Image (spheres, rainbow, N blue to C red):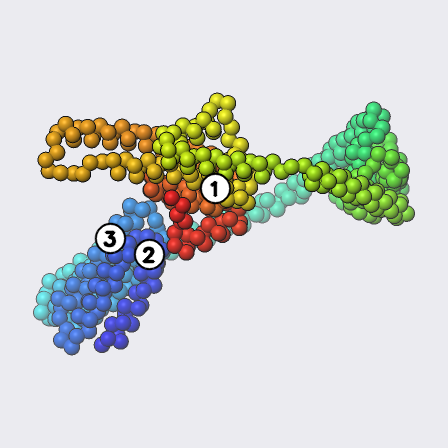
Amino acid sequence: MAEVVERNVEDGLTEIVHIRRAKLFNEAELREIIRLRRYHEYSIQKRNKRLSDYEAYIASELGILRLVIIRRQKTADCRFKDEIERSIISRLTRLHRQICYRFQSHVDVWIRFLLFNRKLGRHMTVVRLWEQILQIHGRTDPRLWAAAASFHLNEGARAQARAVLAKLKTERHALTMAAKKVKQLRESLEALHLRKLRASISRSVHLAWDRTHLRGIREARHLLMQGLAFNENSAFLLLELLKLEGSAADFFKRRVSGRYQAAGDKVEGETSGRKKGMGRYRDMGMAAKEDAVAFMNEVTEDVDSLKSGKTFNLVLERLVTFSTATSKDLADALMIAKKFSSFVDKATLRKLSDRQKILLTSETAEMEKVKQTIAKKMHTATSPTEDIAALAEQRHIELMRLLDNGGVEAALTAWETWYHAPSGSNDLLRVPDPSIDLRWMRLLTTRVYILVVAKMLYKSTQPPKTTTTSKEVLAEAVSAYQEFRLKQEARVRDTRTLMDALAASNWGSKVPDFWHLYMEFEAKLGDCSRLPSLRWRAEKCLEENPRVKFFNALAAGGPKEFL
């Protein structure tokens, strides 16, 4: 019995998984569903079968199904319907079949199963159930025959009507397909004329684009030549001219050369066309030749020279001997020449490559000299970072001395004087990399530690609570607490503003301990609800290695403690 129960429970685990993924129930509700199903499975697997056990199981599954529907309406989530609702319905169907088999003498069991299938829209199942009901209870209850007749009169007639409508729908689809065939035949009759119009429009579009491109090349060449006349030492303009001549050579080779040949063969085409039959293809050929002649009348350039790349090679030779060209300019020229390798001169390309290598060697040597000079200057100069770190250590010692002698207000006043006065500066905290020296982190920790000391001092000065405390003493205590709370909240806000400003600097991207200190500050003095957002900000702001250290520290036992 236990094996059957566990098998039935395991069959529903896939349904539980999809319910969890759809977030329709929480974990406690899912555990309760599994517990109820195991309980009901054991109850229906007992040796003595009881109708109440089956009815309780069916009622439980119906309640789960209704609750799933309600939760879907609230969340507007329709995922996994086949895996959840269909699984529950199949379980209900199995339970109804078992209860009808084991308790055939109960008419209400059959009627409930019949109504269940009727609500699901299973017409043929309802018909078969009526046949079984009449076979078993037809001799004992005449009303069942009347109910079956009523069902066949209403539901059966509707089912037959649906079948007839489906057949009519098929015939309507056949008529639609026939209409489409007629439409296709009509379109085929118009295709010949439309093909001619389409070919004519296509030729006009290509001709318009070719004319526009030709005029654009002319205008661009004119502007670049004029720019080189005013800027004789500009290697950039010469490179742009090289790109333009490469594009022009490619354009003349792909688009103009065919029209040039078609325009040259016009006279021969006219004499040979008379010997051929008159037809659509001959008319299209003549139209293409007329377009080619009209286009070539606008071309004033030497087509053979441009399509062979002679102009491109002339500009490339000019770059080889250009005095102000750098190795980068020549490298760019080599990349351009490789793109148009079909018509570039190999000898000129070798000369350009050799000169580029010579210039690169000389520029590299010059850069090494500059680096050595800078290194010497850096070696002889004093390090300002060390001075700033020493000043940070001095400020830390001064803050601790003021905290011991003058108290919290003296330490905070000194901090405000150093860092927030109109003529003050934040340079001690605005360092390139605060993680390389612990003195900066120690100074920031001291600033937060002052607030912790203020809180501890307030608690230590409070009188012990007694039952005989007078109202005047209580009023003074409440007034003192309100005054301290307002001061402490202002201090916390100022500290949070400082920490937010540092979070957007190198502190937030390079120092994982800064985020541990920030989280400890919020946990002990500020707002604990900000801790998840601080963790998210740390994940987004920290660089790769500091982020790994930060999360390793969290995984090892939570954020570090500095206070």
Foreground of the two, 28 or 120: 28
Query: Could you tell me the amino acid type at mark 2?
Result: Arg
Q: Nearer the viewer, residue 434 or 493?
A: 434
Q: Position of residue 127 (x, y in %)?
A: 24, 64
**If you read the primary sequence from the N terminus, does the residue marked by circle 2 or circle 3 appear first?**
2
**Residue corresponding to mark 1:** 441
Residue at position x 34%, y 63% in the image: 14
Q: Earlier in the sequence, mark 2 or mark 1?
A: 2
| Distance in Å between CA atoms under marks 1 and 3 | 56 Å
Q: Residue at x 18, y 38 (%)?
A: 464
Q: Residues within 10 Å of mark 3 (few under 14, many from 20)?
A: some
- Distance (Cα) linking label 2 and label 1: 45 Å
Horizontal side, residue 207 vs residue 119: left or right: right
Within 10 Å of the Cα at label 1, are there few (<14), some (14-19), or many (20+) other Cα atoms? some
The residue closer to the viewer here, 160 or 321, is 321
Q: Label 1 sits on what residue type?
A: Met
Q: Secondary structure at mark 3?
A: helix
Secondary structure beneath dot 1 equals: helix
Instruction: Using the image as rendered, state which of residue 324 and residue 494 is in the foreground.
Output: 494
The residue at 81%/38% (across/down) is 326
Q: Earlier in the sequence, mark 1 or mark 3?
A: 3
* Disc 1 versus disc 3: nearer the observer: 1
Residue 415 screen position, x and y as percent: 43, 30
Q: Is residue 199 left or right of residue 93?
A: right
